[in-house]
Image (tube, rainbow, N blue to C red):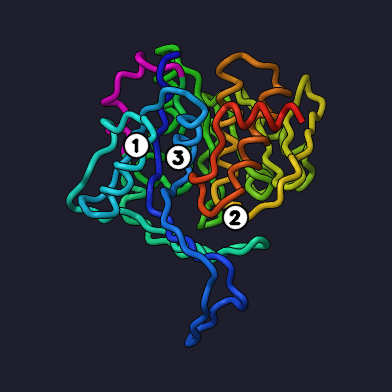
Amino acid sequence: MRKILVAGDINVDLICSGYQTFPAPGREVLVDDFVMTLGGSSAICAMGLARLGNPVAFIGKVGADSWGDYCIETLRAAGIDVSGLARDPTLRTGVTISITSAVDRALVTFAGSVAALRAADVDAWALDDASHLHVSSFFLQQDLRPAFRRLFALAHSTGLSTSLDPGFDPAERWDGLAETLEAVDLLFPNEVELAAMSGTTDLADGLRRMSKHRTRVIGKLGPRGSATLEKDALLELPAFAIQPIDTTGAGDSFDAGFLHAWLREQPIRECLRWGSACGALSTRGLGGTPSQPDAAEVRALLAT
């Protein structure tokens, strides 16, 4: 199988878990656990794909600092090609601090190098040496956003399929996506993102409104499972019953599982099952990457 190119955001996640009361201004609270892991939607998806046994190359930017060293070494240790991961001495690597519990979480992010990737950084890659291009965090990629449609069209012209996880829009304007979708094969919004982008809370109608041109929309519904349209009928699958410890990056692990099956031309229902299994299994520990499953673990869960 040719490489899967994953482009976009990468940062360090500092995760504090198990607070008794949430911190208020001027107060200090203790937590039960702490981990440092790789973060960024694109990076978590890349790690999930590699864990499943796929050849992966990552394209992104980090700063020339210790956080950047950590990001590069973590990807490299997972067998991911990091020759497309640039180090910019004018930037500092992004960091997210997550204060999390089994119920909810709050995030504080220093974006740093997260939004510094440009189309030229991706164009420099030989796209014809890959099978698929996946990009996450559309609304965070400020420098890349104007070139998204052209980039995906270029990928198609060289025989690649494409996918996009839009992520949340911090400005909550949710604009600029329509033209890009003309060249996207798979769109992976969660329930909140789908409702905001489509302008409706009706699941089937939201999927229908966003399924323009060539785009298949995969709705990630958290504990409710996942959904898509199959011949204009709603296809919904339930989630796997796993008690979560931390849901950080579960949607990005879903993307990895779905793509793993989809690129092997599995039926759409099976792709949803692989996505849901990978998303669920990734919540067994703190952080988006430490508990991501390999293919054997997914098959074992699917068999049950």
Q: Quadrant of the C terminus?
A: top right
**x then y, percent, for residue 276:** 67, 36
Q: How crowded is mark 2: few (under 14 residues within 10 Å), some or many (20 or more)?
A: many
Part of the protein shown in magenta? 118-131
Query: SS at mark 1?
Result: helix
Residue occupied by mark 3:
42
Q: Which amino acid does label 1 sit on?
A: Ala
Q: Is residue 48 left or right of residue 213?
A: left
Q: Which of 27 and 192 is in front in this view?
A: 27
The residue furthest right is 233
Q: Give me the disc on residue 77.
A: 1
Residue 5 location, quadrant = top left
User: Do the numbered discs 2 and 1 sit on residues whose CB atoms are within 8 Å?
Assistant: no
Task: Kindly identify the residue that appears in the image at 44 percent across and 12 percent down.
Answer: 159
Task: Kindly identify the residue that appears in the image at 43 percent across and 56 percent down.
Answer: 13
Q: Judge whether residue 199 can be spotted in this image.
A: no
Q: Judge whether residue 14 can be spotted in this image.
A: yes
User: Magenta stretch: residue 4 in it?
Assistant: no
Residue 100 location, quadrant = bottom right
User: Magenta stretch: residue 124 in it?
Assistant: yes
Q: In which quarter of the image is the N terminus?
A: top left
Query: SS at mark 3?
Result: helix
Q: Earlier in the sequence, mark 2 or mark 1?
A: 1
Q: Which amino acid does label 3 sit on?
A: Ser
Q: Is residue 175 left or right of residue 269?
A: left
Q: Earlier in the sequence, mark 3 or mark 1?
A: 3
Residue occupied by mark 2:
246
Q: How crowded is mark 3: few (under 14 residues within 10 Å), some or many (20 or more)?
A: many
User: Do the numbered discs 3 and 2 sit on residues whose CB atoms are within 8 Å?
Assistant: no
**x then y, percent, for residue 174:** 56, 48
Comparing labels 2 and 1, the label whose residue is closer to the camera: 1
Q: Is residue 172 left or right of residue 114?
A: right
